[in-house]
Image (cartoon, helix red, strand yellow):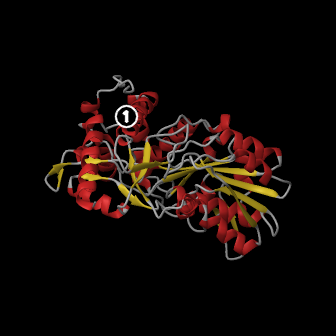
Amino acid sequence: MQPAIDNTLDIQRIRQDFPILDQEINGRPLVYFDNAATNQKPLSVINALTRYYEGYNANIHRGIHHLAEQATAAFEASRRAVQEFLNAKHWQEIIFTYGTTDGINLVAQSYGRHFLKAGDEIIISTMEHHSNIVPWQMLCEEKGCILKVIPINDEGELLLDEYEKLLSEKTKFVSCVHVSNSLGTINPVKFIIDKAHEVGAVVLIDGAQASSHLDLDVQALDADFYVLSAHKLYGPTGMGVLYGKKDILDSMPPYRGGGEMIKEVTFAKTTYSDLPYKFEAGTPNIADVVAVKTAFEYMAGLGKENIAAHENDLLLYATEQLNELDGLRIVGQAKQKIGVISFVLDGIHHQDTGVILDQQGIAVRTGHHCTMPLMQRLGIAGTTRASFAVYNTRDEIDRLVVGLRRVQKMML
């Protein structure tokens, strides 16, 4: 039985908003299934970037001329848009970064170096992206902290009873992914946060994959920190967000020094700006910050619940169709998932699969997806990953299935 098709959105009309999709790759119409790495940008976002550079390109905050004031207003309007998107209590809790990785490093190097000490324990999970592993390893090496890892089951779900066993009065920080980029697993982050708070630990949630698929409310989650990247929200690359509770951010020292983040500088002493500016040293990525507001408006216009319903339909349909292929095994069978399917083909290397699919105009991601410890736990070198966005269709999934049959025919 096929899952019901979501008819709320006119996908063919939506596809017209994304000019990059209207092209051929190797003589075939492009099928873009690499959305977990980055999704494509609607024309409205591209135009927002152009309008900034053509109409009011100027440095922000310090200028008193018209262009500087216009750019500053647009920049800060995006901060308010992010506050609303996350339902943060204060606009000062929104720190602009260069992406999820930058946000995690900011917390590790500012909060971690200032508050954590030798013997303190940091908990992460088996399914973390390298960007939520390496900064904590570096901190542990520097400070003498101990890194502990939440295990998973074979379906790609966290073992929550084991997580509870890891928690103790020594636990000072927990950092966990909201949605796995490799498996699509949606983690029960509210439970993770609540249990960590019971022992007095501070929690960071990596929302890079969750932000375009799930409704987010950092107040309801009670997250201490939440990080995300604009380029996975139909926005520009090189721009991200760190949300942090105001009292925690106030207690943290600056991560970088320079212009913008100061109140007064003398050779004897420097005093720092208030939130959020003490964490935003130097000229920021103004154009991309300005354009992210347009990306939020685009998603709101479609309705995030409609986007989620469409992507879930694609997930169900793709799962059904791929399960019909002999010799294909889906990796990651969590009960709660977003539109990400990773799989292996018996006897065929994932890189060969990706190359042959690319020859047919189908873009997928292959490899370990920056989750090498997860792949080691699953006993595989890597997977082929197809990940979906609002502009993808069932017809494209049918093309993927045909393409995989061709891969098997050529390689076996």
Q: Nearer the viewer, residue 123 or 373?
A: 373
Q: Where is residue 390 shown, x and y percent of the image?
A: 36, 37
Identity of the residue drawn at 67% across and 56% down: 124
Q: Residue furthest right?
A: 169
- Residue tagged by mark 1? 317
Q: Residue furthest left?
A: 27
Q: Where is residue 2 shown, x and y percent of the image?
A: 36, 27
Quadrant location of residue 17?
Answer: top left
Residue 356 sits above or below residue 292 on the image: below
Residue 146 relative to residue 387: left or right: right
Identity of the residue drawn at 56% across and 65% down: 259
Report if residue 163 is visible in the image. yes
Q: Nearer the viewer, residue 396 or 54?
A: 396
Quadrant location of residue 187?
Answer: top right
Q: Where is residue 162 shown, x and y percent of the image?
A: 74, 50
Residue 366 sits above or below residue 50 on the image: below
Residue 120 sits above or below residue 185 on the image: below
Q: Where is residue 19 shown, x and y percent of the image?
A: 23, 44
Identity of the residue drawn at 25% across and 59% down: 356
| Quadrant in the picture for the C terminus | bottom left
Q: Amino acid at mark 1?
A: Tyr
Residue 320 relative to residue 10: left or right: right
Quadrant location of residue 407?
Answer: bottom left
Q: Nearer the viewer, residue 273 or 236?
A: 236
Q: Secondary structure at mark 1?
A: helix
